[in-house]
Image: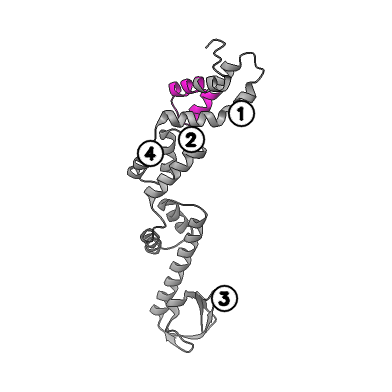
Amino acid sequence: MPRRISSLRTGRNGRTVTVKLEGGESFPLPEPAAAGLHPGQTLEPGEIERLKRESRLEDAYGRCLGLLARRPRSRAEIERYLRGRKLAEAEASSVLERLAERGWIDDLKFARLWVENQQEFRPRSGRALRLELRRFGIPDDDAREALSGLQEEPAALAAARKKAPRLVRAVAGHPQARLEFQKKMTAHLASRGFDYELSRETARSVWRECSGGDEGGKD
């Protein structure tokens, strides 16, 4: 059944227009989509549904931009968010493609940035990082590319050096400080995904750095 537009109200930001239909129903539209509409205009049901769909898509797109402004996100994260908003599959795909075309979502770029950030602030092994990228929904090819330059030894050393000051304080005064430090450091590195031998050798190396070369005690 055709319905008549009773009023059009421009939002405070000037970017949206609220379309009110006779009977009280209303919905917002991006200002360009409302161009050509006027009070008293009669809209067919198909036209009303098209305008409502455009409103849903614009709202979802804006909300996704808000999420992405807080931090980069993978395509799978945005896809899960859109599913949670109960958009139809075709509508969610439309929003995702628009975001991708404009460079807002890019899994390879996301993976590279995430790996770089993690290695600076919380170094981990390539295996651990790969598992975490998988949880973000990053395709295996993109994960491999993002991790291609990662070297395990420097990453383990960086992780150990970040932890070392705290461990040195924790074992201070212990009768077997070196052994206690190495045990705790080895466990810490293993929890970051590094293999046992690398963790053990890195723990020894960092103890020497912290203790001025002291090798006292037995393994």
Furthest toward the top, the residue is 218
Q: Is residue 56 above or below residue 131?
A: below
Q: Which mark is residue 12?
A: 3
Q: Mark 4–mark 3 contact, CB under 8 Å?
A: no
State the SS at label 2: loop
State the SS at label 4: helix
Packing grade of label 2 (10 A; few <14, some 14-19, many >=20) is many
| Amino acid type shown at disc 3 | Arg
Pick the front one: 45 or 168: 168
Q: Which mark is residue 123?
A: 2
Residue 146, position as x, y percentages in the image? 37, 42
Q: Tell me the residue at 64%/25% (across/down).
A: 169
Residue 132 magenta: no
| Amino acid type shown at disc 2 | Pro
**Which corner quadrant of the image does residue 143 belong to?**
top left
Residue 151, position as x, y percentages in the image? 39, 32
Packing grade of label 1 (10 A; few <14, some 14-19, many >=20) is few
Residue 86, position as x, y percentages in the image? 46, 61
State the SS at label 3: loop
Mark 2 vs mark 3: which is more N-terminal? Answer: 3
Mark 2 vs mark 4: which is more N-terminal? Answer: 2
Residue underneath mark 4: 147
Q: Which mark is residue 23?
A: none
Mark 2 vs mark 1: which is more N-terminal? Answer: 2
Residue numbers of the magenta segment: 185-204
Mark 1 vs mark 3: which is more N-terminal? Answer: 3
Q: CA separation, marks 1 and 3?
A: 53 Å
Packing grade of label 4 (10 A; few <14, some 14-19, many >=20) is some
Q: Tell me the residue at 35%/38% (across/down).
A: 148
Q: Is residue 75 above or below residue 56?
A: above
